[in-house]
Image: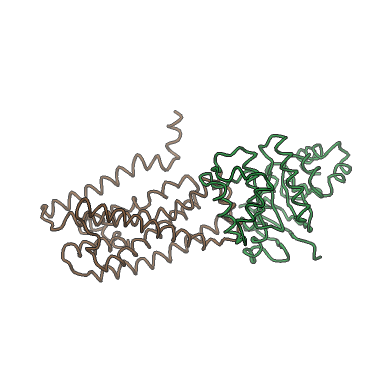
Amino acid sequence: MRYLYLYPRSVPRILDIFFWPMVELLIWGFLTLYLQQSRLAIPNFITALLGALIFWNFIQRSQQAVSIAFLEEVWERNLLNIFVTPLRISEFLIATVFVGIVRLILIGLTLGVLAYLLFKFNIFFFGFLLIPFILNLFLFGWILGLLATSIIMRFGQSAQVLAFALTLLLQPFMAVFYPVSVLPKALQYFANLIPATHVFEGMRVVVFSGQIPLTSLFFATVLNIVWFIIAIIIFFKMFDYILETGQLMKLVD
Amino acid sequence: MTDVILEVKNLRKKFGKFEAVKGISFNLKKGEILGLLGPNGAGKTTTIQSILGLIHPTSGVVSIFGKKMPGDREEILSRVNFSSAYVSLPTNLKIWENLYTFARLYNVPDFKQKVKDLAGFFQINDLMGKMYGTLSSGQATRVNLVKALLNSPQLLFLDEPTASLDPDIADRVRRYLKIFQKQDNLTILYTTHNMGEVEELCDRAIFINEGKIITQGTPKQLVRRFGKKDLNEVFIKIAREKHL
């Protein structure tokens, strides 16, 4: 009974039952569909898959750098100590960017070297495009981190699962391992609003055709700028909300 | 008045329909220790958080060092510090890592020497290499106080600093505080539920209940005014009688 009482009001438990299995089903389902449609005759498929996996890690870790930095202060009951120093919230955010960049470099190096040694996959296959690709993924991860932190500020620790999983929630629609065209039409519109979708689409263009996907990069960058502005507005509104409602202390409790 | 460090004028805070703080006004002079007292839910925490800029007050003015909060937040907070029994430092950092981090946040010049001096005063030298999470309550309180004094604050907010300490350790902490307060002519806003502590430490006390100031004065004046044996009895009377 003790556990059953918890289920109706516990977001992580509800996600465990309904959402995560659905996310996995969608990802593997769409990937299978893609493989079936292309009758397994996709050139450089392994390269595209490994590239997607490494790029995917860039988004996920960059998102976590922001939201887990904030959550760590909550878990450690250190949030008030931080916010009674002269530190500005904007400086706190900039610090998370630096942490994110360090993580990004370390992850990139580790995965890049491992992928080369084990699978002969060279991340520099993408040439100079690697830089705008990665910057776009990093920025989008950071945007998701800001949004996850905003939701945690609004709904408290019950929403902390988002700090780890917001990117996963969006993964089926980002077309990480399969092209957008595999998705149902309605979902394609949604997918095209996500900056990372265009990066992954662009990455596949490079792998499969060797062409430079400037349109994909353009859309990814423009969408990132729009989402960045939206995320910043939401973040500062939520920060204002916790100062207005006295939630800062309650976040820690 | 130039020696007023903190001035709170007609501070109000509403959470929806509930008014937690109902027009509180008081000030704090240089070198004074003021006890902000009251039962749970009286409005003490909301008042302190409003002063520190952690809550937006609904109305009223908070001036510290003659500057307005939150307008001059960064300048004010660089000269203020805070310690609470209910707030902790990161448990997965060593003591010196914690103190160095906060010293940098406060932009303390020659911070390594400052940490060394304070660590010597509070006798935490042997703890510097330990993780904060492994400390006892008494050790953690001393480390919290070192953190709170890193920037040589002119105004210190102490929220029940001796809560959860045994009487011996609590007495030591009070002694440390007295020495430090005298040495630096430190101004302190102190909250506690230990009335003996208020009698021992505070120059003046303000009793708050249901968001309003009920009475204020020196501990001795308050005991006399209410015709009670000690401040503990005054507290109980105020907490139990809603409208004095």
Q: Is residue A102 left or right of residue B87?
A: left
In the displayed structure, would residue A13 be above or below residue A208?
above
Q: What residue is drawn where x is 36% and y is 65%?
A: A224
Q: What residue is drawn where x is 15% and y is 52%?
A: A35
- List x then y, in percent, for residue B226: 86, 41
Q: How is the image coloured?
A: by chain
- List x then y, in percent, for residue B166: 69, 34
User: Which of these two is toward me, B71 or B102?
Assistant: B102
User: Which of these two is toward me, A251 or B125?
Assistant: B125
- List x then y, in percent, for residue A169: 34, 50
How many numbered badges does the structure rendering display?
Answer: 0
- List x then y, in percent, for residue B87: 60, 46
User: Which of these two is toward me, A164 or B99?
Assistant: B99
User: Which of these two is toward me, A220 or B131?
Assistant: B131
Q: Is residue B75 left or right of residue B178?
A: left
The N terminus of chain A, quarter of image: top left
Q: Give the colour of chain A.
A: brown
The C terminus of chain A, quarter of image: top right
Looking at the rendering, which quadrant does residue B219 occupy?
Answer: top right
Q: Give the colour of chain B.
A: green
